[in-house]
Structure formats: C-alpha cells, structure tokens
Image (spheres, coloured by chain):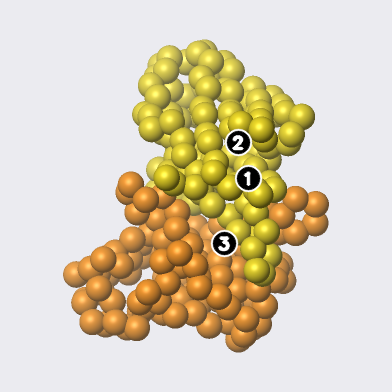
Amino acid sequence: DAGITQSPRHKVTETGTPVTLRCHQTENHRYMYWYRQDPGHGLRLIHYSYGVKDTDKGEVSDGYSVSRSKTEDFLLTLESATSSQTSVYFCAISRTGGVETQYFGPGTRLLVL
Amino acid sequence: RKEVEQDPGPFNVPEGATVAFNCTYSNSASQSFFWYRQDCRKEPKLLMSVYSSGNEDGRFTAQLNRASQYISLLIRDSKLSDSATYLCVVSSRGNYGQNFVFGPGTRLSVLP
C-alpha cells in the first residue's frame, strides 16, 4: 500500500464543465503522475510532477492542467470537459531507493455527458 | 510502432496450466522492466521487477533479453485468482526522473 487516495472516485459531469480530480499521498514522494486509461490505448501519461510547483507534460496533455502546491497533493483539472475525456484516471507515485517503481491510486471514473 | 508491445490475448487456460506472456520494447536505452497485474476495474499493481539474470517469485518467472529487447512472464500451475490483465512496463531516464511506458496488456482468464 503506497498511501495514495484519489477523490472523487466516480464523477458524472456535463460537457463544458470544469472538473478537478485530487490525488493525495501520505509518504512524501517527490514524483507524482496522472494517467488516463482507455480501451485499446492502455495507460497514457497526462502530466507529471517532480516537486512542489514543478510539473511537465506527458503524452496526452491537451485539455488538462495540473497543480502541485504541496508535496502530498497533485490536482488534475479539466478546464472544460469534453466527451473524449470520459475515462478512468489513475494517479501514481514513484518510489525511489533501488529500482524506481510506480504505485497507483485506486482511480477515478469520469463520465462526461 | 508502439514503444511497448504485448501478446494481444486474451489467453484462456485451465487451472494448473502453464502460460507465458511476451513483451517487446523499442527503446534500447530502457533501464528498468516490470510486470504489473490489473484486476477488472482496479488499479495496476506491481507483480515483479524483471532483472537481467531473470528472477522468480513462487509460480512466476520473469526473463529479460536486452539484446532482443524482449521480456517474458511465465506463470506455472495457474490459479483462478491469476485471472487478470498483465501489463509489461519499461522505464528509461527522462528529463526529470524516470519515464514509465506501459504496454496495452494481455488478459488472462483461468478456467475451472
């Protein structure tokens, strides 16, 4: 258990609505990640953070922004949700010390109508 | 070509069978290798890291061939509880920390 929680766990929203997903970790890890998982595409990186206020884009960052004002929280915002952003969103941390390895939160299921 | 490719699956096997999953990767600078399992509607969970010399954890054996850029996972004496999707993961040095690239996964169903 890597001490990662995500909220909300499920959300239904309408097109054009802003949405913020929260990832919270309790183990003070430096690196945090947001992925989306869709059938036929597997896990794809949206954004990641390498420290407080330090973030970078991933493979599918268009339409998403992130913020990290505290080590323990990494927020993902959909400024204006679209149906193509219907997905399962996973937050992850990477645990260093030996081989750097990723651990995931339980996921957020987002449906954009 | 995708950076990490896996057997398309699904694999349907009887309990007790031995099943092997294959994975290839395209980035020759890849440094670390993993197998994750993902149960339906759950998050991916680390199954095992894969080392150059090969490694075993109970009924699970992972092998790495860097020259061929190939990774495998062997499950012996399959159990019903092994039913899941198995993800091959490769990491390499990025600008900030490691980049992790996930394969699409291979679904396994172990049948009674």
Residue A52 shows in the view: yes
Q: Residues within 10 Å of mark 1 (few under 14, many from 20)?
A: few
Tell me where residue A76 appears, x and y as whole percent. 46, 76
Q: Nearer the viewer, residue A112 or A38?
A: A38
Q: Which mark is residue B28?
A: 1
CA distance separating discs 2 and 3: 26 Å
Task: Check disc 3: other Cα within 10 Å, few if <14, some if 14-19, many if 20+.
Answer: many
Disc 2 + disc 1, Cβ < 8 Å: yes
Q: Which residue is mark 2?
A: B69
Reading the image, the residue beneath label 3 is A92
Q: In this image, B8 relative to B4: left or right?
A: left
Q: Amino acid at mark 3?
A: Ala
Question: Does the image show residue A1?
Answer: no
- Mark 2 and mark 1 lie on one chain; the one further toward the N terminus is 1
| In-front residue for pair A61/A69 | A61
**Extreme residue in the right direction:** A98
